[in-house]
Amino acid sequence: MPDHQPTPIGAPMTVAPQVVVCSNPLSAHAPTMIAQDKATASGSPPWGRRRVLLLNTTFEPLTALPLRRAVVLVVCGKAEVVHDDPAGLTLHSATTSVVVPSVIRLSSYVRVPYRGRPPLTRAALMHRDRYRCAYCGGRAETIDHVVPRSRGGQHTWQNCVASCARCNHRKADKLLSELGWRLRVVPTAPRGPHWRLLAGITDTDPLWLPYLGEPAA
């Protein structure tokens, strides 16, 4: 097995705030707005399924909003655009044209209460392990239990790692000691203000990465 230097684990967990949106003309037109959707042709999600990263005034990531709600916040003056959609998508209503944002920032600070350990999801675990196999360092595609569940292993942050399909298949239900393998890093539960958000993100917009403290998938 390749013996690479371990990639550090951990990065900034967050709780989505309840943001009150105002009543405005764009809200009524949002479902019927017409878009010159260059992004859809390039493989990005259609605008109706798109998400926009919402930052606090401190640039701390808070949540991923539906596009319609994000546009309403901007039009109401409750948020400002930090990054436009890289594909140049524009929404048009009868009276308004809006360049679709990828990242927006609240105009007023929202205090987010601390909550405990983030949920263990595939997305969060892949982010934690930086999409690298815990055994060989290759590109991870699956999740593996270090101590197999068939042998008493638990589904916890400390016993789950990202793995490539080849290592996962070779390891099967064996213990590392039986294979002579070792982990490149010690799996731990992530800490920090971004992880609750990361737990629910599967497709990360590259423009979000500087705010999430994460490498590109």
Image: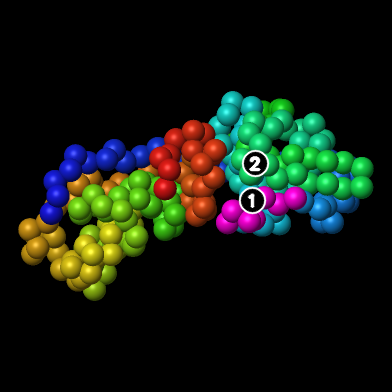
**Which quadrant holds residue 165?**
bottom left
User: Are the two marked residues, 2 and 1, in contact with CB atoms closer than 8 angstroms?
Assistant: yes
The residue type indicated by label 2 comes to Asp
Q: Position of residue 196 (x, y in %)?
A: 50, 46
- What numbered label is drawn on residue 214? none
Q: Earlier in the sequence, mark 2 or mark 1?
A: 1
> What residue is at 78 percent from the left and 46 percent from the top?
91
> What residue is at 69 percent from the left and 32 percent from the top?
81
Task: Look at discs 2 and 1 and give the one toward the viewer.
Answer: 1
Q: Badge 2: few (under 14), some or many (20 or more) residues near its Cα, within 10 Å? A: some
Q: Which residue is mark 2?
A: 85
Q: Is residue 11 in view from this perspective?
A: yes
Which residues, given as a range, are shown in magenta?
36-43
> What residue is at 71 percent from the left and 52 percent from the top?
37
The residue type indicated by label 1 comes to Ala
**Which quadrant holds residue 105?**
top right
Q: Position of residue 145 (x, y in %)?
A: 27, 62
Left or right: residue 59 versus residue 133 is right
Q: Which residue is mark 1?
A: 39
Left or right: residue 195 versus residue 21 is left
